[in-house]
Image (tube, helix red, strand yellow):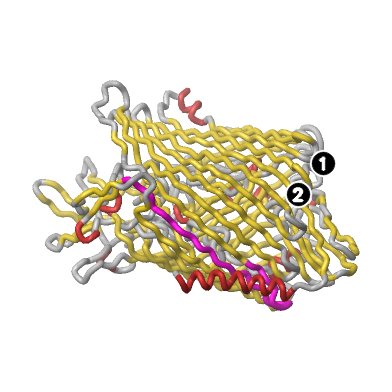
Amino acid sequence: MKITKQLFFKLLFLMAFAWNASAQEKVTLSGTISDDANNETLIGVNIYIKELKTGIVTNEYGFYSISVPKGKYELQVSYIGYKTIIQNIALNASIKKNIALESDSEQLQEVVINSNDKSTITNIRKPEMSTNKLTIQEIKKMPAVLGEVDVLKSVLQLPGVTNSGEGSNGFNVRGGSTDQNLILLDEATVYNSSHVFGFFSVFNSDAIKDIKLYKGGIPAKYGGRVSSVLDIYQKDGNSNEFHMNGGIGLISSRLMAEGPITKGRGSFLVAGRGSYAHLFMKLSDNKNSAYFYDLNAKLSYKLSDNNTLFASGYFGRDTFKISEDFSNTYGNSIFNLRWNHLFSDKLFSNLSVIYSDYDYGLDLPSEGLTWKSGIKNYNFKYDFKHYASDKLKLTYGVNAMFYAFNPGTVSPFGSSSGINFKQLDKKYAAEPSIYVQAEQELTDRLSVNYGLRYNMFYRIGETENIYANDQAVVFNDAMQIYQSATPISVKNHDGGEVIASFDNLEPRIAVAYQLSENESFKASYNRMSQYLHLISNTTSATPLDVWAPSDKFIKPEILDQVAFGYFKNFKDGAYSLEAETFYKRSKNHIDYIDGADLIANNAIEQVVLTGKSRSYGLELLVRKNTGKLTGFASYTLSRSEQQTPGRTANETGINNGEWYRSSYDKMHNLSVTGAYQVTEKWSFGGIFALQSGRAATFPNGQYSYGGMVVPTFEGRNKSNFAAYHHLDLSATYIPKPDKNKGWQSEWVFSVYNIYNRANAASMSFRQNETSGANEAVKMSIFGIIPSVTYNFKF
């Protein structure tokens, strides 16, 4: 690591040199930008100085800072859904200027972009690609399925993003698995992002302020996952006056309250949701049920102009029952305490202490057992944003995480159970890291964002299986199959002893070259490492899946990604085009031997092999940003493959060592989203999604052995399910659109899967009891689902 560490500190020196080189007699304009009505800080607001053709955007807490030569300037502040502010300002000394933006209801109904609005140019100039940002105002303009705006549904419409299948949790990004997505809610890790088989997300849109999805060019402050980062921030709450809003629907309802603790300085927010469709099932003597509930809470208080405290939390649960024979409960618990401190008008800091807990359990009364497992995460973060000059911005910080894994606890269910208590070996790990990143304008046309992240990982444990030749999986030459090895001994360690350690240096760089005010080329490269692995042989998370840390047998996955893109705005931003091509490759990608048993396996290394993966593709995103009809169309052409060759010349590897399609490979992915404002009272929306069917392994024959019929199978993932598609429509009626105070309401009518497409969630093969012929049986979960919801606020 000697060379890499030298590179790391050399980058620090270069950044400091660039800072000093750019220093001259300048003044600094800084402050926060917020919503005029509720004092809520706004993320990603564009601040543009016309004369210098330069600008800045607010950070995650609404803060901005820009240093410029002394002089008189025209300052423009713009943000979608708000009226643009243009004012002349004389900067003869450094000043702090807080700005409140007024919501533009007309702009929300029929979006109009001012030709002087340079926010689109800022996006063209910014060295940031493979990134999609959505404000809650934009999300609320999208069609509301089941009467509720959904954050994850909006993300699934973006290029490069697919769902894991009908009735499945999570999402896939650029050919990656669900566990390769880092999902953050107020900086806290969310391990399961879905309610009710992926039909709802865990994110209550009433409580959400801003979301941002990074598919590539991922900034150095993020680590721990190799596919994507979904960064979501909750609202702070209204510090001016008390308000409530909510919705009553056929399937679920929600309610949120927010208001000041101390007017103008402190606020609170509490939001809750719950579903109750299972209650109607009980009325019809249906003993099956599926329901969820969750709670969001947040407190914020401004101690002084330079210090603000935040405390936020989330708690959610899902329960799924089949008669009295099966019960599954799972959910997330999150708490975060944060301190914002402004050291100067150029240096902003955020200190966070975070707790995340995901537990999942299963009750099987018929088998007389209860299963529980989970993962806990304790996280300390200290981040700094340094606005060194108008041409150079530095971001740096430290991060330390501690993990506690419970692979499984088996307990007897009921007094008559014959099951004995069993605790699988608990596991622990620590992951400290440090990062630094710079965003720099090299010329008027060329901007670059570059950085490094150095992370370490320590696997901590008390027991360790020892295998002959250090191989937990052995190859049977006679049968030409892989089998689990038997440990030759068990080594006991003292509590807290490190039994495996890793470290990696992750370079990141993104470059933007502006061809004109309305078009640019961009390129990016990033390396990511992932030390946690979701042990699963399904395409999405299930209650019996477990998270496992890297160790001497399961190495961390290392991924490299390059991307190139062309970006253009047309007709003063009325239309926009984003085209990107990407290539990803990784090593130490987890694969499983044939017949791997993952349930209650206390030695998971005995069924795991590591190989490599690759994915590549083309993404297109076309937007219509103005007029009564707005929306976007996205298309992705991609391929996702993996390979696990034999470790020696005698071993066959998985799938004979050949490349094969990953379970989440979908060559074609098309999504069209539209919203049409007919009148002030009526608006309509629609989403059409079309994806290639998931890759699958089907039987291709059979033989008889000892009176039993044994199926034979084709190569891994050689076939695929039928294409996945559905059309969702919604209509929104606002009785009194001009009413801005008091009781305000709207009706949302929606139909999910309007033509009742039976998309396959799974496929099973069996012998027909009558004819004796072999047959394939498709299982579908959701058909057409109409819904109506009454939303209100006061």
Nearer to us of marks 2 and 1 is 2
Left/right of residue 24 with respect to residue 182 in the rendered view: right
Residue 444 inside the magenta-drawn segment: yes
Q: Is any part of residue 251 visible from this angle?
A: no
Q: Which residues are magenta?
A: 438-462
Q: Residue at x 41, y 66 (%)?
A: 586
Tell me residue 158's x, y (percent).
57, 58
Where, by quadrant of the figure, is residue 308 drawn? top right
Left/right of residue 56 with respect to residue 195 in the rendered view: right
> Which quadrant would the C terminus be assigned to in this image?
top right
Secondary structure at badge 1 equals: loop
Could you tell me the amino acid type at mark 1?
Answer: Asp
Tell which circle, 2 or 1, labels the residue nearer the N-terminal end. Answer: 2
Q: Residue at x 82, y 57 (%)?
A: 84
* Type of secondary structure dominating the magenta stretch: strand
Could you tell me the amino acid type at mark 2?
Answer: Asn
Q: Which residue is mark 1?
A: 738
Q: Is residue 760 above or below residue 657?
A: above
> Which quadrant would the N terminus be assigned to in this image?
bottom left
Tell me residue 107's x, y (percent).
78, 53
Tell me residue 590's x, y (percent).
35, 58
The residue at the far top in this view is 415
Q: Residue at x 34, y 51 (%)?
A: 537
Where, by quadrant of the figure, is residue 115 drawn? bottom right
Q: Which residue is mark 2?
A: 306
Q: Is residue 267 above or below residue 175?
A: above
Query: Badge 1 local density, few (<14 within 10 Å), some, or many (20+)?
Result: few
Secondary structure at badge 2 equals: loop
